[in-house]
Amino acid sequence: MSTLLIKNGTIVNEGKVFKSDILISNEVITKIAPHIEEMADKIIDAQGLHIFPGVIDDQVHFREPGLTHKGNIASESRAAIAGGVTSFIEQPNTVPNAVTQEILEDKYRIASETSYANYSFMMGGTNDNLEEVLKTNPRNVAGIKLFLGSSTGNMLVDNEAVLEKIFSSTDMLIAVHCEDEQTIRENLAAAREEYGEDIPVTQHPVIRSAEACFKSSSKAIELAKKTGARLHVFHVSTGIETELFRNDIPLEEKKITAEVCVHHLYFTDADYETKGNFIKWNPAVKSESDRKKIWEALLDDRIDVIATDHAPHTLEEKSQKYLQAPSGGPLVQHSLVAMLEFVKEGAITLEKMVQKMMHNPAILFKVEKRGFIREGFFADLALVDLNSTPWTVTRENVLYKCGWSPFEGKEFTSRVSFTVLNGQVAMENGIVNEERYGQRLLFNR
């Protein structure tokens, strides 16, 4: 049994900011008190540091199996640990797609051997795998993922009868990527008519338009209401979609929830001129008006979770022309420090940020004993210096296998000093411990 004592830190947890010590024994928090004098195997003096629950990122693409030239579970989870992300939920559009229980469990096997962070994986739904979907174990699988727009791979679910059957047949959380395929195809045809095969990236939010997003997400929500399904809408990117969600009931009672990603809070369509394909995501980064309305919905609790949709591609892939360049970008190493810049600007409070990045993912996925700093909970913590020496994101200091970041050139003024995972120091002063302490997430359902 190993013990860890963290002294003199400032805890941010459950709407409160307070000075306290934390005693950790055998993976869990055993005591939270102002002055703990007990002996421990290791002591961290957290004077000047803020202590957050570890970030739970509910949507990442770590590319293994099949796409490991872009990233893998080891490389991307290592970057996550460096950024204070202690748990991730990975998506099924790997190769082969995780659409059978056998393929899904193979991903868990790989993670059990290689992941630096805690892990879970979504089971993928298709037009013809309902039987496999219904075998999914709610205790140790995060949920079901459906692509209602063919963002990547061949996982588009466009059979309405199948969709309704999935919605009505499972009590598990169903997470959806919402973009209307027909609208996108029509917009792409119009763009080709105007530009030929050399479409500028500035057309991305025109092709993958707000209309395409709203049409798909409103349809999914209507179906969830009809069937009583537990629906979670990933990466809301438009102002009009925010009107579909409620904030008049507690999160625990919501059957329909929403997530926003860091890049939709940070970038706008004006940034395509300088960032080009490096901010090409699906759904697209849209207008300043959309960004403003997403922020409003985040702050008034219509949007429940902040995540990344971390999705690395190689520099070579991203450097192609618009039509050939894949959508997605790497974010897990910088999501927490990016949100802390918004805290410093007064856009969001520390307490609200912790709610959206740590508490709420744990609540809506019913993650067992994580997402909070509580006695008896697993000790997953991020210790952050909010007033560090400013540092700049460069290709030399990113840990992603793809070797780049959309935040390149951005100066951050906060730094993750320690990441504690299951009671072990997984990262200290920028150096990730090569011991792997990640565990499979379990769910209270």
Image (cartoon, grey):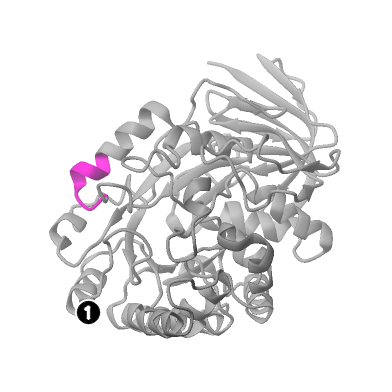
Q: Which residue is mark 1?
A: 160
x%, y% of residue 222?
36, 84
Residue shown at 75%/64% (left/top)?
348
x%, y% of residue 372?
59, 46
Residue 101 counted in the magenta span: yes
Q: Which amino acid lies under the numbered mark 1 shown in the image of this protein?
A: Glu
Residue 223 counted in the magenta span: no
Residue shown at 58%/61% (left/top)?
279
Q: Is residue 175 left or right of residue 132?
A: right
Q: Magenta region: which residues?
A: 98-105
Q: Is residue 283 left or right of residue 274?
A: left
Residue shown at 55%/49% (left/top)?
330
x%, y% of residue 65?
32, 40
Label 1 secondary element? helix
Magenta region, main secondary structure = helix
- As displayed, is residue 429 above or below residue 101? above
